[in-house]
Every structure is written in structure tokens, then in C-alpha cells.
Amino acid sequence: MEFFDVVKERFSCRKFSAQPVEDEKLEKILEAARIAPTAKNAQPVKIWVIKSPDALEKIKSAAPFPWLKDVPVILAVGGTTEGAFVRPSDNRNFQDVDATIVATHLMLAIEALGLGTTWIGMFDEPKVKNLFPEMKDYDLVALFPVGYKADDAQPSDRHEKRKSKDEFIKIL
């Protein structure tokens, strides 16, 4: 799929089939995320692949959306301040920006491979960290369900609502 088709066709999928995701596709998704640009290439990011039945049950308890029931894989993305680029002028740590860039690459790769996802920001982060202690030192930016879109999956009614170019862009 061409890049501009990917960005135009992608929507927040909240209806999945039970079809498993092939390991080859999952590897391509993870590679697209791994090679994403980060500030000074510090890569202060980690991705956790949640796909065992036990791990899926746990993560779904921290993001209890009924439409996650058939999702075969959930990816968690987090960043750590340790080793991240810090802007000298104001000491701003870029770990959250880096994790967001990685997450965006991941999300677009999922679409390019004919799968669906949505950016889940509404989850119980303390509960996730309690259930998965390996995540405790990271700020979790999002969870991404990964699966084949159900035949009747549709974008939400908010999908097409966009600001006008004049509202969104200012040329100086």
C-alpha cells in the first residue's frame, strides 16, 4: 500500500475478527517501530507484545472494552526518561515524543499490512504496571490492539471531522 493511501485509509478500528495475525506481519510491524526516528537516536522506548491468552486477559482487565474480545495481539508502547534526549534550553525530556513517534510508525505499519488498530490511551496504567512488573519503569503512552478488521468494521462518525486547512495550518 502506498504511504498516502495508508494515511488516508487508516481509521480507529474497534471491531476485529478472530483471525490470528501471522508472525511475519507482526515482525514487520515491530521492525517499522524499531527503526522509527527518535531524538539523537537515543531510542528510550520499549514495546511489549502481549499475545498469550493469560497476558491478553490481564491487559484487557486494565482496558475493559468489549470490542477487544477477539483481538489476538495487543502491543504496549512505553518510554523511559533514562537515556532520552534532553533539550538543553529548557531541560525538556523527549521520551514521550520518541515513544509517540515509534507508536505512530507501528500504527501506520499495521494499516499498511491490511490489519486494524486503534490508539488506546484510556487504560489503567497503574494496573498494567502491577500486572506486568517489567513495564514499571516506563511511561506507557498507548496500547494497540492488532488484528484483522471485521468485515463490518467502520470508522467512527468523528473520523471525517477535521479542521479546515486555514484553522490547522499557518504559513509564516
Image: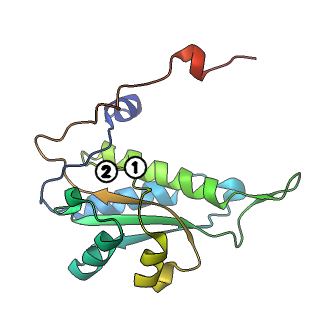
Q: Is residue 72 left or right of residue 104?
A: left
Q: Is residue 62 left or right of residue 46?
A: left
Residue closest to the eye, 3 or 69: 69
Residue at the extreme top:
166
Amino acid type at mark 2: Thr
Identify the residue at image location x=70%, y=73%: 82
Q: Which quadrant would the N terminus be assigned to in this image?
A: top left
Q: Which quadrant would the C terminus be assigned to in this image?
A: top right
**Earlier sequence position, callout 2 versus callout 1:** 1
Identify the residue at image location x=62%, y=58%: 96
Q: For residue 127, what is the image quadrant?
A: bottom left
Residue closest to the eye, 157 or 39: 157
SS at mark 1 in the image = helix
Residue 25, position as x, y percentages in the image: 28, 57
Q: CA distance from mark 2 to mark 1?
A: 7 Å
Q: Residues within 10 Å of mark 2 (few under 14, many from 20)?
A: many
Q: Are marks 2 and 1 in contact (CB under 8 Å)?
A: yes
Say above or below: 123 vs 106.
below
Say above or below: 143 vs 153.
below
Identify the residue at image location x=30%, y=78%: 58
**Residue under pointer 2:** 117
Residue 19, position as x, y percentages in the image: 12, 59
Tag on residue 14?
none
Q: Is residue 45 left or right of residue 20?
A: right
Q: For residue 6, what is the image quadrant?
A: top left
SS at mark 2 in the image = loop
Residue 21, position as x, y percentages in the image: 21, 61
**Residue under pointer 1:** 107
Amino acid type at mark 1: Met
Q: How many marks?
A: 2
Q: Residues within 10 Å of mark 1 (few under 14, many from 20)?
A: many
Say above or below: 60 vs 106.
below
